[in-house]
Structures are given as C-alpha cells and as structure tokens.
Image (tube, rainbow, N blue to C red):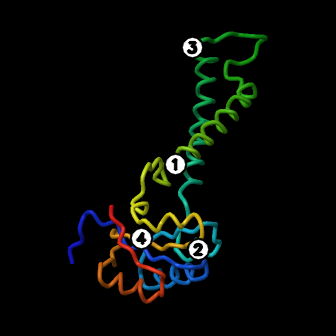
Amino acid sequence: MRISSTLYGLMAEFDDANALVAATRRAHDEGYRRMDAYSPFPIEELHEALGSHHSRLPLIVLIGGLCGCVGGYALQYWAAAIAYPLNVGGRPFNSWPAFIPVTFECTILVAALSAVLGMLALNGLPMPHHPVFNVPRFALASRNRFFLCIEVKDRKFDLESTRRFLETLEPREVSTVAD
C-alpha cells in the first residue's frame, strides 16, 4: 500500500507507564523498529523495550580526543622544533615532557567538543518542530499521558494493519500523526 508523504506515523495514547512499556515490548516483538515512546517522566524499562542500540557517541569522543592529542602535540612540535627553534639551556627542540600539559588540555578540549557536537548530531538536534506536536492530545505527554508512535519509515508499517495492531494494545486513542 502506498503511504502519503504527509504522514509521519500512528500514535497510541496510554493511561499509565506499565501499559506503555508492555505495548512497546509487544510492538518490538511484532517486528516494529522505527518507533518512539513519550512519557512525562523517565521510565527505566522503556529503553530496553524500544530495543535501543548502543550509542556511537563514545567512539566519536575517543576519535575527538585522539585528534586533540595529536593536534596539540603536533602544534607544539611545529612551534618549538620547526618554526621557531630556540636553544634554551641546552634542551632538545623536541622536549616532550614540556609538551604534556598542553597536549592533555587539547585532548580534553577536543573530546568535550566532540561529545557535545556528536550528541547534538546523533539526537538530530536542533529540531525546532517535531511532527508529534501536530497531534492535539500530545500536549498531555508532559502531564499524565504516555504515547507510543510507530513511524511510516518502519519497514513493517502498513496504515491499516498497524492501526489494527495498535488498537489491540488497548490504548485510550490511536491518532494519525501528520508530517
């Protein structure tokens, strides 16, 4: 079935956190992978129920730290040994013990910047508007309601069968989310 390009997905509304976690587990067991859950407070079991994978952020931070380390050391080596070689007290031009503090600080600086920028990129931020805000009842997600949204991008998504599946989860309401 051809899905309209203006459709983002289907959203089910639940009354409590346990119902949301159970529904999310069941949706994952049925083969849905492109979905997200929304609640007014953090739910520890929800991360596992969504089948979330490990983040690539630690690798991004490691690469950023290594680049900062190599870059900081290379900058000092270039300045002390190539661009401005000064013989001070008979020390060698490549005096690596003197380069350690700046190398360490460059490692931390670039790793921290990589962490912030990597987190923003992996989270898809900045996102001034998300399609779930088009559902009027979604305003209750910050108060006392719990939502599960299955996206059109999911390979198993079919408008009628996904709607029927969501209705078997006994939600308060199933809404269409416009893009």
If you read the primary sequence from the N terminus, does the residue marked by circle 4 or circle 2 appear first?
4
Q: Which residue is drawn at 58% across and 32% down?
A: 71
| Distance between mark 1 and mark 4 Cα atoms | 20 Å
Query: Where residue 20 sits in the image (x, y, percent)?
Result: 55, 79
Position of the C terminus, as image quadrant, is bottom left
Does residue 67 appear to the left or right of 11 in the view shown? right
Q: Which residue is drawn at 43% across and 85% down?
A: 30
If you read the primary sequence from the N terminus, does the residue marked by circle 1 or circle 4 appear first?
4
Which residue is disc 1 drawn over?
A: 120
If you read the primary sequence from the N terminus, does the residue marked by circle 2 or circle 3 appear first?
2
| Distance between mark 2 and mark 3 Cα atoms | 56 Å
Q: Give the number of the disc on residue 83.
A: 3
Q: Which amino acid does label 4 sit on?
A: Arg
Q: Residue furthest toward the left?
A: 2
Query: Where residue 174 sits in the image (x, y, percent)?
Result: 41, 78
Query: Where residue 38 sits in the image (x, y, percent)?
Result: 53, 68
Disc 2 crowd, CA 10 A, few/some/many (<14, 14-19, 20+): many
Which residue is disc 2 drawn over?
A: 46
Position of the N terminus, as image quadrant, is bottom left
Name the residue nearer the viewer: 55 or 12: 12
Q: Which amino acid does label 1 sit on?
A: Leu
Q: Residue at x 30, y 66 (%)?
A: 7
Q: Residue furthest toward the bottom?
A: 168
